[in-house]
Image: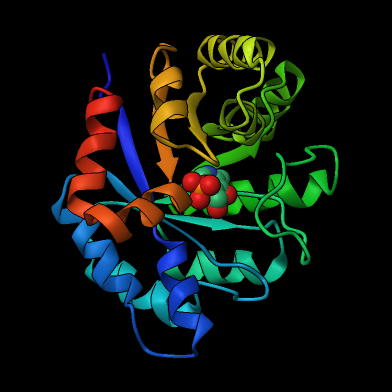
Amino acid sequence: MKKIRLGVNIDHVATVRNARGETYPSPLRAALLAEKNGADSVTIHLREDRRHINELDLKKIIHKLKIPLNLEIAATKEMLKIASRSKPPFICVVPEKRKEITTEGGLNLDHNKNFLSELIRKLKKRKSRISLFIEPSLNDLEKAKKLGADCVEIHTGKLCNLINNKKDYKNEIKKIQKAVRKGGQLGLEVHAGHGLTYSSAKILSKIKGIQEFNIGHFLIGESIFEGMPVTIRKFKKILKL
Ligand code: PXP
């Protein structure tokens, strides 16, 4: 069986830096610390408005990191150009709305379909592994396969919200379970991410077939209190990595 991986998203180290327009804390330092403490990959989201990570961060991190960098991008011409130039080993295509606080849902795979498939084809040629961030929808899994993606990342935001608010999450977890199974049948690698905490990671760790978890906001928040090494270790233990 393939090893399950933990991707550490360090965007919010840059959020803290940018809140003061300062040069610290350093996202590069966070990326290297995550690597040293057992992360399997580091995720950064280069947003159109550069609200956290910027291109200089991308350059520095990709140059120094030995584990794979997972670059999250919107499906735009600008991002296609940047990703083609920097050739990160992993790419995850995400939807982006300027005014959202965070990535609110999965991609609409019917929107801009031709450009999306061109982007996937071009970036795969450059040897990047391409993942699409989607809702746990069986239709979207089939569409992702048709578009030529290598992987899908299931948006776990809704599930995490229900768990955090102590609401019934049975239906949502069933949807995710079905989506993971379908992904396996289609030969897609299935990942999960968004809003994950220790409790939601524990619940999701019981679903067999999720190959990668990408975790950021909660992990960086907990690192304020316990440090990144301890927080990563706790997540790895919960996910049984
Ligand atoms: N995966 C994807 C595709 C994302 O867009 C994000 C948020 O940027 C995450 C995982 C991490 O989400 P969080 O920061 O809520 O853990």
Residue farthest toward the left in the current orientation of the protein:
36
Query: Residue visible at 40% across and 55% down?
Result: 221
Quarter of the view holding residue 177 = top right
Q: Residue 93 at x, y = what percent? A: 61, 49
Specify the quadrant that holds the N terminus.
Answer: top left
Residue farthest toward the right in the current orientation of the protein:
111
Query: Residue visible at 72% across and 63% down?
Result: 76
Query: Residue visible at 48% across and 30% down?
Result: 191
Asked if one can make out residue 10 in the rendered structure from this viewpoint, the answer is yes
Q: Where 185 falls versus 129 (above or below)?
A: above
Q: Where 206 falls versus 25 (above or below)?
A: above
Specify the quadrant that holds the C terminus.
Answer: top left
Query: Residue visible at 72% across and 48% down?
Result: 116
Q: Is residue 122 left or right of residue 54?
A: right
Asked if one can make out residue 39 in the rendered structure from this viewpoint, the answer is no
Q: Residue 40 at x, y = what percent? A: 26, 43
Q: Where 137 falls versus 207 (above or below)?
A: below
